[in-house]
Image (spheres, helix red, strand yellow):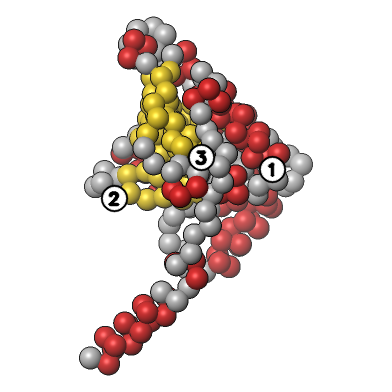
């Protein structure tokens, strides 16, 4: 009984945090349909540029959510590294938890949380690997220490001690001295999230937020021009 009471007191203490009981109301700046470009990729680039211009930390950081073969969801933050070929690109270890999930169930969502601007972008769609040549080109342009780390880390696997990882990094550094080429490991490369839905969210006062969603127009879902960057898109306003 005492243990149960202690646990309850612990939970009650957590409820005392101010952030659990307060909310900063958002402003009155609207997001209207007329504000949006007809192409969601163009609109995303506009908002990303404005996030960069506002000095946000890591404006290209996105919360990537996946689901594995058992239906278990998982999320983590990754960096967007390209918007091209009708998709949003990121790079990671293929054997990581997210890589395994994408191999089993190649769909994902990505959320860009630009809180200081009272904006979010949520992208949902299918995921495919980029070509080996694209992964090679990106890996070759990474900082040297990031290249070594990508080889050294068996991402998402248990690690006995940090010293073991640091020893592995030192060994790889000796095998591939700085200034020379570092080969991309086969277990590391890029993915492209190909959207079927992109939502632009703008915070408004009293929770009456603006939510505008792009989806492919029905007449462009089939046929030779149905790739996302060649589609026509329709915009729907959702209730907040």
Lower position in the chain sequence, tag 1 or tag 3: 1
Distance Cα–Cα, label 1 vs label 2? 36 Å
Distance Cα–Cα, label 1 vs label 3? 16 Å
Quickly name the residue at label 1. Answer: 54
Quickly name the residue at label 2. Answer: 72
Q: Secondary structure at mark 3?
A: strand
Q: Residue at the top extreme? A: 224
Residue nearest the viewer, comparing 122 with 151:
122
Q: Is residue 140 above or below residue 84?
A: below
Q: Position of residue 32 (x, y in %)?
A: 51, 29
Lower position in the chain sequence, tag 1 or tag 2: 1
Residue 119 is tagged as: none
Residue nearest the viewer, comparing 20 with 139:
20
Q: Locate the N terminus and report the quarter of the image it occupies.
A: bottom left
Quickly name the residue at label 3. Answer: 202
Local crowd at mark 1 within 10 Å, few (<14), some, or many (≥20)? Answer: few
Q: Locate the C terminus and report the quarter of the image it occupies.
A: top left
Q: Is residue 147 above or below residue 218?
A: below
Q: Secondary structure at mark 2?
A: loop
């Amino acid at each position: 009984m005492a243990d149960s009471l202690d646990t309850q007191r612990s939970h009650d203490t957590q409820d005392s945090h101010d952030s659990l009981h307060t909310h900063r109301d958002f402003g009155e700046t609207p997001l209207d349909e007329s504000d949006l470009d007809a192409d969601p990729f163009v609109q995303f680039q506009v908002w990303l540029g404005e996030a960069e211009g506002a000095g946000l930390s890591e404006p290209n950081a996105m919360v990537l959510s996946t689901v594995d073969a058992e239906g278990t969801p998982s999320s983590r933050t990754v960096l967007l590294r390209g918007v091209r070929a009708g998709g949003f690109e990121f790079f990671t270890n293929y054997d990581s938890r997210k890589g395994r999930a994408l191999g089993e169930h190649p769909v994902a969502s990505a959320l860009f949380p630009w809180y200081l601007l009272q904006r979010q972008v949520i992208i949902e769609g299918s995921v495919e690997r980029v070509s080996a040549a694209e992964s090679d080109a990106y890996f070759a342009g990474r900082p040297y220490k990031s290249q070594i780390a990508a080889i050294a880390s068996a991402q998402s696997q248990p690690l006995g001690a940090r010293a073991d990882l640091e020893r592995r990094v030192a060994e790889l550094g000796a095998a591939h001295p700085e200034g020379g080429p570092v080969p991309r490991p086969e277990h590391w490369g890029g993915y492209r999230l190909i959207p079927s839905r992109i939502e632009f969210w703008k915070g408004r006062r009293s929770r009456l937020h603006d939510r505008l969603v792009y989806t492919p127009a029905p007449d462009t879902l089939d046929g030779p021009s149905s790739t996302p960057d060649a589609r026509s898109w329709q915009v729907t306003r959702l209730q907040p």
